[in-house]
Amino acid sequence: MKNLLIATCFLLTANSFAQGMFGKNPYRNQQQWDQQRVHYGYYLGFSSYNFKFDYKKSFYEKNGSDEILVEPTTGFNVGLVGNLRLMEYLDLRFEPGLYYTRRNLIFPHITNPDQRVRDVASTYINFPILLKFSALRAGNIRPYILTGISQSLNLSSNETSKDDNYQGRFRMKKWTANYELGLGIDFYFEHFKFTPSVRGVFGLQDELIRDKNPNSPWTGDIESMKTRGLFINFTFH
């Protein structure tokens, strides 16, 4: 009976919340929010980074189909949001953030097990400039899509290191440019706005620094290596 009462109270509360947020005629929270010229916020979230490799013809001639494998892990994100209203359905956003991630690169064609894996830990400071295209607000929700470009600073790139893979050092370029595309939903609460979103990040430049030996089994036959990433952010305004 006690559990039944608790469940009933929970369902009634959830139903009341749902009616208030999504009902036929919900009370509209923060009715003037979108009229602000400028507003700010912050976000927390998760990320999963990967690499897209393109190979020279010589790679397949030497190694067959043994392409480089990438094992991504889940990292975390934290950052700030600056939003400039351009017009009714269009905003300009700047979302600088700190992104930490780790990827394991496995080179199947290298027979020495001690040299086959490279642990690539990266700490990025990301500087995206984005355009946000919002739909018509329905009650207390408003979906949107966004797109833009970004520059990322890799604090763990090893770009200036004199050591390379022969000394166990995997090197990447410090700066890289990206294209970003995502979608999300603004939820308007009584005292704040909450926004979950998902975003894909696509590197536009080759980020790999080759080893000194042009015939290196790690880098010699790679045409390009570009970042691919997936971000899930939770933003509070």
Image: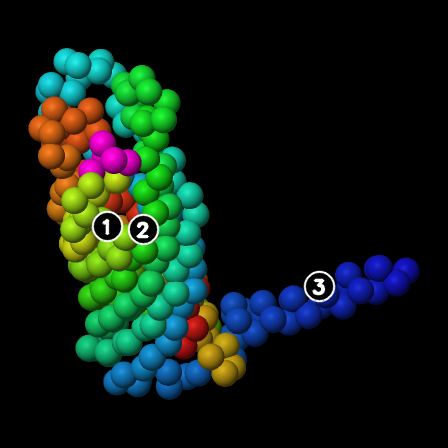
Judging depth in this view, the residue of 167 and 191 nearest the camera is 167
Residue 201, position in %: x, y? 26, 50
Please give the range of residues in magenta: 164-168
Asked whether, in this view, residue 218 is left or right of residue 189, the answer is: left
**Would you name the residue on which mark 2 appears?**
122
In depth, the one of 77 and 106 nearer the eye is: 106
Separation (CA) of disc 1 from disc 3: 51 Å
Question: Where is mark 1, residue-wise?
Answer: 157
Left or right: where does residue 139 sit relative to residue 207? right
Q: Quadrant of residue 35?
A: bottom left
> Callout 3: helix, strand or loop?
helix
Q: What percent of the width, then of the height, locates residue 199?
A: 32, 54
The residue under label 1 is which amino acid type? Ser
Q: Residue at x 24, y 55 (%)?
A: 154
Residue 95, x across and y down, in percent: 28, 68
Magenta highlight on residue 33: no
The image shows residue 24, relative to residue 209, as above or below, that is: below
Number of residues whose C-alpha sits closer than 10 Å to that of mark 3, classed few (under 14), some (14–19) or many (20 or more): few
Dot 2: element? strand
Residue in front for this viewpoint, 222 or 156: 156
| Residue beneath disc 3 | 11
Left or right of residue 78, residue 64 in this image: left
Tell whether label 1 touches label 2 (CB within 8 Å).
Answer: yes
Position above or below: 103 against 156: above
